[in-house]
Image: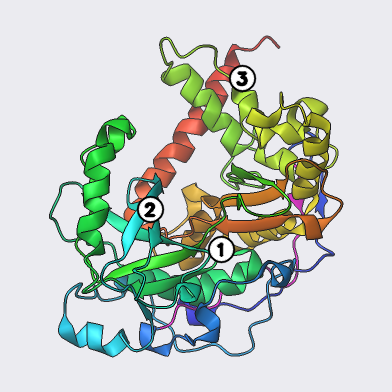
Amino acid sequence: MALSELPQRQPGADQRYTEAAHPLQHQRQSKANPPAAPPIEAACAHHPTTAAATTAIPDHQQHSNHAPVVTRIPSAVDVPASVASYPLHGDEMWQKHHLKHKHLPRGSKPVAFVGEGAANAVFEIKLPQHGSSDSNFKGLLLRVAKVPALGQPTAYNYLFQQTFYQTTIRPLLGSHAIHQELVILRGSGIVDELNRLLQALDHTRKPKFRGSFVGQSDWGLLIEDMRPDPKAPTPRILVEFKPKWLSQSRSAPARAVRCRQCALELQRMLTRPVAGAGPFNPERKPCPLALVDEEAPPAVSSPFRIAPQLATAPERELLRTSLEHILHDPFLEDLCAQQEGLDVTGPLGASPNDEKFGIAMTIRDCTCFALIPKDDAAHGPGDLKIRLGDLDWKDPQTKIQHWQGTEQSLIDVEAEVSFDQPA
Protein backbone atom coordinates (compact mmCIF):
# COMPACT_ATOMS: atom_id res chain seq x y z
CA MET A 1 0.00 0.00 0.00
CA ALA A 2 1.30 3.46 -0.87
CA LEU A 3 1.47 5.97 1.94
CA SER A 4 -0.88 8.18 -0.04
CA GLU A 5 -3.62 5.61 0.57
CA LEU A 6 -3.34 5.66 4.35
CA PRO A 7 -6.12 7.31 6.37
CA GLN A 8 -5.43 10.34 8.51
CA ARG A 9 -5.91 10.43 12.25
CA GLN A 10 -5.64 12.80 15.15
CA PRO A 11 -4.83 11.03 18.42
CA GLY A 12 -7.29 11.90 21.13
CA ALA A 13 -7.34 12.02 24.90
CA ASP A 14 -10.17 9.47 25.03
CA GLN A 15 -7.96 6.53 24.03
CA ARG A 16 -7.99 3.82 26.67
CA TYR A 17 -6.98 0.20 26.97
CA THR A 18 -8.45 -2.91 28.54
CA GLU A 19 -6.45 -5.34 30.62
CA ALA A 20 -5.89 -8.96 29.67
CA ALA A 21 -5.58 -11.76 32.22
CA HIS A 22 -2.05 -10.70 33.14
CA PRO A 23 -1.89 -7.14 34.52
CA LEU A 24 0.81 -6.09 32.05
CA GLN A 25 -0.66 -7.74 28.98
CA HIS A 26 -3.20 -5.03 28.32
CA GLN A 27 -4.27 -4.03 24.83
CA ARG A 28 -6.07 -0.87 23.88
CA GLN A 29 -9.56 -1.10 22.49
CA SER A 30 -9.59 -0.93 18.71
CA LYS A 31 -10.80 2.30 17.20
CA ALA A 32 -12.91 2.65 14.10
CA ASN A 33 -10.21 4.86 12.60
CA PRO A 34 -6.83 3.50 13.70
CA PRO A 35 -3.78 5.77 13.62
CA ALA A 36 -1.92 5.99 10.38
CA ALA A 37 0.78 8.08 8.77
CA PRO A 38 0.61 10.87 6.24
CA PRO A 39 2.61 10.17 3.09
CA ILE A 40 6.22 10.86 2.32
CA GLU A 41 6.57 13.53 -0.34
CA ALA A 42 8.08 12.68 -3.66
CA ALA A 43 10.91 15.19 -3.39
CA CYS A 44 12.47 17.64 -0.97
CA ALA A 45 11.58 20.49 -3.28
CA HIS A 46 7.99 20.33 -2.00
CA HIS A 47 8.93 20.90 1.63
CA PRO A 48 7.22 23.87 3.31
CA THR A 49 10.63 25.10 4.45
CA THR A 50 10.54 28.79 5.27
CA ALA A 51 12.55 31.10 7.46
CA ALA A 52 9.89 30.86 10.12
CA ALA A 53 9.88 27.08 10.01
CA THR A 54 13.62 26.67 10.42
CA THR A 55 14.15 28.47 13.70
CA ALA A 56 14.44 26.63 16.99
CA ILE A 57 11.00 26.25 18.56
CA PRO A 58 10.55 28.33 21.74
CA ASP A 59 9.74 26.36 24.90
CA HIS A 60 6.39 28.05 25.41
CA GLN A 61 5.14 26.73 22.06
CA GLN A 62 6.05 23.11 22.69
CA HIS A 63 3.50 21.73 25.12
CA SER A 64 0.84 20.56 22.70
CA ASN A 65 -0.10 17.02 23.70
CA HIS A 66 -1.47 15.76 20.40
CA ALA A 67 -0.44 15.70 16.77
CA PRO A 68 -2.23 18.18 14.49
CA VAL A 69 -4.84 17.19 11.94
CA VAL A 70 -3.33 16.98 8.47
CA THR A 71 -5.73 18.66 6.08
CA ARG A 72 -3.82 18.34 2.81
CA ILE A 73 -1.78 15.40 1.59
CA PRO A 74 0.93 16.11 -0.97
CA SER A 75 1.94 13.67 -3.68
CA ALA A 76 3.58 10.50 -2.36
CA VAL A 77 6.05 7.91 -3.47
CA ASP A 78 4.96 4.28 -3.61
CA VAL A 79 7.66 2.93 -1.31
CA PRO A 80 10.03 5.04 0.81
CA ALA A 81 12.95 2.75 0.07
CA SER A 82 12.46 3.29 -3.65
CA VAL A 83 13.28 6.98 -3.48
CA ALA A 84 16.21 7.56 -5.81
CA SER A 85 19.58 8.04 -4.13
CA TYR A 86 20.48 11.70 -4.23
CA PRO A 87 24.03 12.55 -5.43
CA LEU A 88 25.95 13.87 -2.45
CA HIS A 89 28.13 16.23 -4.44
CA GLY A 90 26.04 16.80 -7.57
CA ASP A 91 25.89 20.46 -8.57
CA GLU A 92 22.35 20.08 -9.92
CA MET A 93 20.98 18.74 -6.64
CA TRP A 94 22.89 21.29 -4.58
CA GLN A 95 21.69 24.21 -6.71
CA LYS A 96 18.12 22.91 -6.45
CA HIS A 97 18.13 23.18 -2.68
CA HIS A 98 20.80 25.68 -1.63
CA LEU A 99 18.43 28.68 -1.50
CA LYS A 100 15.97 26.88 0.76
CA HIS A 101 18.24 25.92 3.63
CA LYS A 102 20.78 27.44 5.98
CA HIS A 103 24.45 27.39 5.02
CA LEU A 104 27.09 26.65 7.60
CA PRO A 105 29.65 29.41 7.04
CA ARG A 106 33.32 28.73 6.45
CA GLY A 107 35.27 29.04 9.66
CA SER A 108 32.65 27.25 11.76
CA LYS A 109 34.30 25.12 14.44
CA PRO A 110 33.22 22.23 16.66
CA VAL A 111 33.01 23.23 20.31
CA ALA A 112 32.14 19.86 21.81
CA PHE A 113 31.53 16.26 20.82
CA VAL A 114 28.03 15.54 22.14
CA GLY A 115 27.59 11.88 21.22
CA GLU A 116 27.36 9.26 18.49
CA GLY A 117 25.64 6.13 17.29
CA ALA A 118 26.51 3.62 14.61
CA ALA A 119 25.48 5.90 11.73
CA ASN A 120 25.62 9.49 13.02
CA ALA A 121 27.53 11.82 15.32
CA VAL A 122 26.38 15.02 17.03
CA PHE A 123 28.46 18.11 17.78
CA GLU A 124 28.08 21.54 19.32
CA ILE A 125 29.42 24.11 16.90
CA LYS A 126 30.47 27.76 16.96
CA LEU A 127 30.13 30.13 14.03
CA PRO A 128 32.90 32.55 13.00
CA GLN A 129 32.65 36.02 14.48
CA HIS A 130 31.82 37.63 11.15
CA GLY A 131 29.80 34.76 9.70
CA SER A 132 26.06 34.14 9.61
CA SER A 133 23.96 35.38 12.47
CA ASP A 134 24.32 33.16 15.53
CA SER A 135 20.59 33.54 16.11
CA ASN A 136 19.94 31.31 13.09
CA PHE A 137 21.79 28.47 14.81
CA LYS A 138 20.93 29.18 18.44
CA GLY A 139 19.72 26.15 20.37
CA LEU A 140 20.73 23.75 17.60
CA LEU A 141 23.35 21.00 17.36
CA LEU A 142 24.94 19.62 14.20
CA ARG A 143 24.21 16.00 13.30
CA VAL A 144 26.36 14.43 10.59
CA ALA A 145 26.64 10.99 9.00
CA LYS A 146 29.54 8.67 9.78
CA VAL A 147 31.57 6.29 7.64
CA PRO A 148 33.74 3.31 8.65
CA ALA A 149 37.02 4.96 7.63
CA LEU A 150 38.41 8.45 7.19
CA GLY A 151 37.94 10.13 3.80
CA GLN A 152 35.01 8.10 2.55
CA PRO A 153 31.84 9.71 1.15
CA THR A 154 28.68 8.98 3.09
CA ALA A 155 25.81 7.02 1.60
CA TYR A 156 23.44 8.23 4.33
CA ASN A 157 20.67 10.19 2.66
CA TYR A 158 19.78 13.21 4.82
CA LEU A 159 17.59 14.64 2.07
CA PHE A 160 15.36 11.58 2.18
CA GLN A 161 15.42 11.38 5.99
CA GLN A 162 14.33 15.01 6.31
CA THR A 163 11.51 14.41 3.81
CA PHE A 164 10.37 11.47 5.93
CA TYR A 165 10.57 13.60 9.08
CA GLN A 166 8.57 16.52 7.67
CA THR A 167 5.85 14.56 5.90
CA THR A 168 5.40 11.58 8.23
CA ILE A 169 7.02 11.93 11.66
CA ARG A 170 6.12 15.53 12.39
CA PRO A 171 2.40 15.09 11.53
CA LEU A 172 2.28 11.88 13.59
CA LEU A 173 3.99 13.15 16.74
CA GLY A 174 3.27 16.88 16.57
CA SER A 175 5.40 19.21 18.67
CA HIS A 176 6.79 16.29 20.67
CA ALA A 177 8.96 15.40 17.66
CA ILE A 178 12.35 16.98 18.17
CA HIS A 179 12.98 19.91 15.83
CA GLN A 180 15.39 19.24 12.98
CA GLU A 181 16.24 20.89 9.67
CA LEU A 182 18.69 20.46 6.82
CA VAL A 183 21.87 22.52 6.70
CA ILE A 184 24.31 22.86 3.79
CA LEU A 185 27.90 21.97 4.67
CA ARG A 186 29.46 22.58 1.26
CA GLY A 187 32.25 25.11 1.42
CA SER A 188 32.27 25.31 5.22
CA GLY A 189 35.27 23.05 5.85
CA ILE A 190 33.45 21.67 8.89
CA VAL A 191 33.89 17.98 8.01
CA ASP A 192 37.68 18.20 8.30
CA GLU A 193 37.35 20.10 11.58
CA LEU A 194 35.00 17.47 13.00
CA ASN A 195 37.31 14.64 12.02
CA ARG A 196 40.32 16.34 13.61
CA LEU A 197 38.34 16.48 16.84
CA LEU A 198 37.30 12.83 16.54
CA GLN A 199 40.89 11.78 15.91
CA ALA A 200 42.00 13.58 19.06
CA LEU A 201 39.21 11.93 21.08
CA ASP A 202 39.32 8.52 19.44
CA HIS A 203 40.84 6.77 22.46
CA THR A 204 37.97 7.96 24.66
CA ARG A 205 35.18 6.70 22.39
CA LYS A 206 33.36 3.39 22.81
CA PRO A 207 35.46 0.60 21.32
CA LYS A 208 32.83 -0.24 18.70
CA PHE A 209 32.93 3.35 17.35
CA ARG A 210 36.69 3.93 17.32
CA GLY A 211 38.15 4.48 13.88
CA SER A 212 34.89 5.70 12.37
CA PHE A 213 34.69 9.30 11.20
CA VAL A 214 32.41 11.87 9.59
CA GLY A 215 31.77 11.22 5.91
CA GLN A 216 32.31 13.76 3.17
CA SER A 217 28.89 15.23 2.40
CA ASP A 218 27.19 18.43 1.35
CA TRP A 219 24.45 17.95 3.95
CA GLY A 220 23.92 17.73 7.69
CA LEU A 221 21.05 18.22 10.09
CA LEU A 222 20.53 20.88 12.72
CA ILE A 223 18.70 19.35 15.67
CA GLU A 224 17.19 20.84 18.79
CA ASP A 225 19.67 20.93 21.69
CA MET A 226 18.05 19.17 24.66
CA ARG A 227 20.99 19.55 27.01
CA PRO A 228 20.30 21.59 30.16
CA ASP A 229 21.28 25.25 29.85
CA PRO A 230 23.84 25.97 32.60
CA LYS A 231 22.92 29.67 32.44
CA ALA A 232 19.19 29.13 32.94
CA PRO A 233 17.74 30.65 36.14
CA THR A 234 16.10 27.29 36.95
CA PRO A 235 18.56 24.36 36.73
CA ARG A 236 17.29 21.30 34.88
CA ILE A 237 18.24 17.65 34.45
CA LEU A 238 18.01 15.72 31.19
CA VAL A 239 16.38 12.30 31.34
CA GLU A 240 16.75 9.96 28.36
CA PHE A 241 14.97 6.65 27.83
CA LYS A 242 13.52 4.53 25.03
CA PRO A 243 9.77 3.84 25.35
CA LYS A 244 10.09 0.87 22.93
CA TRP A 245 7.03 -1.37 22.40
CA LEU A 246 4.26 0.19 24.48
CA SER A 247 1.86 -2.71 23.88
CA GLN A 248 2.36 -6.43 23.53
CA SER A 249 3.64 -7.61 20.15
CA ARG A 250 0.84 -8.97 18.00
CA SER A 251 3.13 -11.89 17.14
CA ALA A 252 3.56 -12.86 20.79
CA PRO A 253 1.88 -16.04 22.04
CA ALA A 254 -1.46 -15.46 23.77
CA ARG A 255 -0.06 -16.85 27.04
CA ALA A 256 3.12 -14.74 27.04
CA VAL A 257 3.79 -13.23 30.45
CA ARG A 258 6.48 -10.76 29.38
CA CYS A 259 6.31 -7.78 27.09
CA ARG A 260 8.62 -7.84 24.11
CA GLN A 261 11.26 -5.67 25.74
CA CYS A 262 11.35 -7.69 28.95
CA ALA A 263 11.57 -10.89 26.87
CA LEU A 264 14.53 -9.36 25.04
CA GLU A 265 16.25 -8.58 28.34
CA LEU A 266 15.67 -12.17 29.47
CA GLN A 267 17.18 -13.48 26.23
CA ARG A 268 20.24 -11.31 26.70
CA MET A 269 20.69 -12.59 30.24
CA LEU A 270 20.44 -16.23 29.11
CA THR A 271 22.46 -16.08 25.92
CA ARG A 272 25.01 -13.32 26.37
CA PRO A 273 26.20 -13.16 29.98
CA VAL A 274 28.81 -10.46 30.49
CA ALA A 275 31.74 -11.66 32.59
CA GLY A 276 32.90 -9.22 35.23
CA ALA A 277 30.06 -6.78 34.58
CA GLY A 278 28.31 -7.43 37.88
CA PRO A 279 24.80 -8.79 38.37
CA PHE A 280 22.21 -8.56 35.63
CA ASN A 281 19.92 -5.62 36.46
CA PRO A 282 16.86 -5.49 34.18
CA GLU A 283 15.21 -3.26 36.78
CA ARG A 284 17.51 -0.48 35.57
CA LYS A 285 15.48 -0.36 32.35
CA PRO A 286 11.78 0.48 32.06
CA CYS A 287 9.17 -2.13 31.25
CA PRO A 288 7.34 -0.45 28.33
CA LEU A 289 3.93 -1.85 29.26
CA ALA A 290 4.27 -0.46 32.78
CA LEU A 291 4.87 3.01 31.33
CA VAL A 292 1.26 3.16 30.12
CA ASP A 293 -0.41 0.99 32.80
CA GLU A 294 -1.46 2.90 35.92
CA GLU A 295 -2.20 -0.39 37.70
CA ALA A 296 1.17 -2.01 37.03
CA PRO A 297 2.81 -3.64 40.09
CA PRO A 298 5.09 -1.28 42.07
CA ALA A 299 8.16 -3.37 41.26
CA VAL A 300 7.92 -2.44 37.59
CA SER A 301 6.12 0.89 37.77
CA SER A 302 8.67 2.90 39.77
CA PRO A 303 9.34 6.16 37.93
CA PHE A 304 13.05 5.64 38.57
CA ARG A 305 12.99 2.83 36.00
CA ILE A 306 13.35 5.55 33.33
CA ALA A 307 16.18 7.29 35.22
CA PRO A 308 17.89 4.82 37.60
CA GLN A 309 20.86 7.17 38.01
CA LEU A 310 18.58 9.55 39.95
CA ALA A 311 17.30 6.98 42.45
CA THR A 312 19.98 7.84 45.02
CA ALA A 313 20.08 11.60 44.42
CA PRO A 314 19.57 13.88 47.46
CA GLU A 315 16.53 15.39 45.72
CA ARG A 316 15.03 11.92 45.24
CA GLU A 317 11.44 12.77 46.23
CA LEU A 318 11.34 15.96 44.17
CA LEU A 319 12.70 14.07 41.18
CA ARG A 320 10.19 11.26 41.71
CA THR A 321 7.34 13.74 41.28
CA SER A 322 8.87 15.11 38.08
CA LEU A 323 9.44 11.63 36.66
CA GLU A 324 5.84 10.72 37.42
CA HIS A 325 4.70 13.73 35.40
CA ILE A 326 6.67 12.36 32.42
CA LEU A 327 4.96 8.99 32.73
CA HIS A 328 1.53 10.62 33.02
CA ASP A 329 2.04 12.89 30.01
CA PRO A 330 -0.38 12.01 27.15
CA PHE A 331 2.49 11.63 24.69
CA LEU A 332 3.06 8.04 25.85
CA GLU A 333 -0.54 7.03 25.23
CA ASP A 334 -0.49 8.77 21.87
CA LEU A 335 2.75 6.99 20.95
CA CYS A 336 1.24 3.65 21.98
CA ALA A 337 -1.87 4.27 19.88
CA GLN A 338 0.27 5.12 16.84
CA GLN A 339 2.30 1.93 17.27
CA GLU A 340 -0.83 -0.22 17.50
CA GLY A 341 -2.57 1.37 14.54
CA LEU A 342 0.44 1.13 12.25
CA ASP A 343 1.30 -2.49 13.13
CA VAL A 344 -1.69 -4.84 12.85
CA THR A 345 0.22 -8.12 12.37
CA GLY A 346 3.39 -8.11 14.46
CA PRO A 347 6.81 -8.87 12.95
CA LEU A 348 6.03 -12.48 12.04
CA GLY A 349 3.08 -11.45 9.90
CA ALA A 350 4.55 -8.26 8.46
CA SER A 351 5.39 -7.83 4.79
CA PRO A 352 8.64 -6.22 3.59
CA ASN A 353 6.43 -3.93 1.49
CA ASP A 354 4.34 -2.73 4.44
CA GLU A 355 5.27 0.93 4.87
CA LYS A 356 3.04 1.34 7.90
CA PHE A 357 4.93 -1.42 9.69
CA GLY A 358 8.20 0.36 8.89
CA ILE A 359 6.86 3.55 10.45
CA ALA A 360 5.72 1.60 13.53
CA MET A 361 9.22 0.16 13.94
CA THR A 362 10.72 3.63 13.46
CA ILE A 363 8.74 5.18 16.31
CA ARG A 364 9.36 2.10 18.51
CA ASP A 365 13.07 2.86 18.34
CA CYS A 366 12.76 6.55 19.23
CA THR A 367 14.44 8.13 22.25
CA CYS A 368 12.54 10.30 24.72
CA PHE A 369 14.43 13.37 25.94
CA ALA A 370 12.85 15.09 28.93
CA LEU A 371 14.10 18.16 30.80
CA ILE A 372 12.89 18.29 34.41
CA PRO A 373 13.57 20.73 37.27
CA LYS A 374 16.62 19.85 39.35
CA ASP A 375 15.90 21.54 42.66
CA ASP A 376 12.10 21.55 42.64
CA ALA A 377 9.33 19.16 41.68
CA ALA A 378 7.48 19.62 38.43
CA HIS A 379 3.97 20.89 39.16
CA GLY A 380 2.54 20.08 35.74
CA PRO A 381 3.29 19.70 32.02
CA GLY A 382 4.42 23.32 31.81
CA ASP A 383 7.45 22.45 33.95
CA LEU A 384 8.58 19.72 31.55
CA LYS A 385 10.12 19.81 28.11
CA ILE A 386 9.62 16.48 26.30
CA ARG A 387 10.89 15.62 22.83
CA LEU A 388 11.13 12.42 20.80
CA GLY A 389 14.22 11.92 18.66
CA ASP A 390 16.18 9.21 16.80
CA LEU A 391 13.38 8.86 14.26
CA ASP A 392 15.18 7.85 11.07
CA TRP A 393 13.22 5.67 8.66
CA LYS A 394 13.49 1.91 9.28
CA ASP A 395 13.08 0.14 5.95
CA PRO A 396 11.19 -3.19 6.16
CA GLN A 397 12.71 -4.37 2.89
CA THR A 398 16.19 -4.45 4.42
CA LYS A 399 15.30 -5.17 8.05
CA ILE A 400 12.34 -7.57 7.96
CA GLN A 401 14.46 -10.73 8.26
CA HIS A 402 16.26 -9.33 11.30
CA TRP A 403 13.00 -8.28 12.95
CA GLN A 404 11.34 -11.63 12.30
CA GLY A 405 14.39 -13.56 13.48
CA THR A 406 14.47 -11.56 16.70
CA GLU A 407 10.75 -12.08 17.30
CA GLN A 408 10.96 -15.85 16.77
CA SER A 409 13.97 -16.15 19.07
CA LEU A 410 12.09 -14.31 21.82
CA ILE A 411 9.13 -16.66 21.42
CA ASP A 412 11.49 -19.65 21.64
CA VAL A 413 13.20 -18.35 24.79
CA GLU A 414 9.86 -17.57 26.42
CA ALA A 415 8.60 -21.08 25.64
CA GLU A 416 11.78 -22.68 26.97
CA VAL A 417 11.69 -20.74 30.23
CA SER A 418 7.97 -21.39 30.69
CA PHE A 419 8.49 -25.12 30.02
CA ASP A 420 11.18 -25.27 32.70
CA GLN A 421 8.92 -23.75 35.35
CA PRO A 422 7.09 -26.14 37.72
CA ALA A 423 3.39 -26.56 37.03
Given the image, on which type of amino acid does mark 2 rest? Val
Q: Badge 3 is on which residue?
A: 418
Magenta extent = 26-41
Task: Give how far across and how far down residue 238 sits, in percent.
Answer: 62, 45
The CA distance from mark 3 to mark 1 is 41 Å
In the drawing, what numbered circle is on residue 111?
Answer: 2
Above or below, 392 relative to 38? above
Q: Which mark is residue 369?
A: none
Query: Which image quarter: residue 257?
Result: top right
Few, some or many C-alpha atoms within 10 Å of disc 2 (few <14, some 14-19, many ≥20)?
few
| Residue 152 lies in the magenta stretch | no
Above/below status of 55 relative to 242: below
Horizontal relation, residue 253 to residue 319: left or right = left
Q: Position of residue 68 (x, y in %)?
A: 68, 77
In terms of secondary structure, where does tag 3 sit?
A: helix
- Secondary structure at badge 2 equals strand
Q: Residues within 10 Å of mark 3 (few under 14, many from 20)?
A: some
* Location of mark 1 (residue): 178
Main secondary structure along the magenta-highlighted residues: loop
In the rendered image, the vertical position of residue 343 relative to residue 413, given as above or below: below
| Residue 395 visible here | no
Can residue 4 be seen by looking at this rendering?
A: yes
x, y percentage for residue 157? 30, 67
Q: Residue at 55%, 24% (x, y): give it.
A: 266
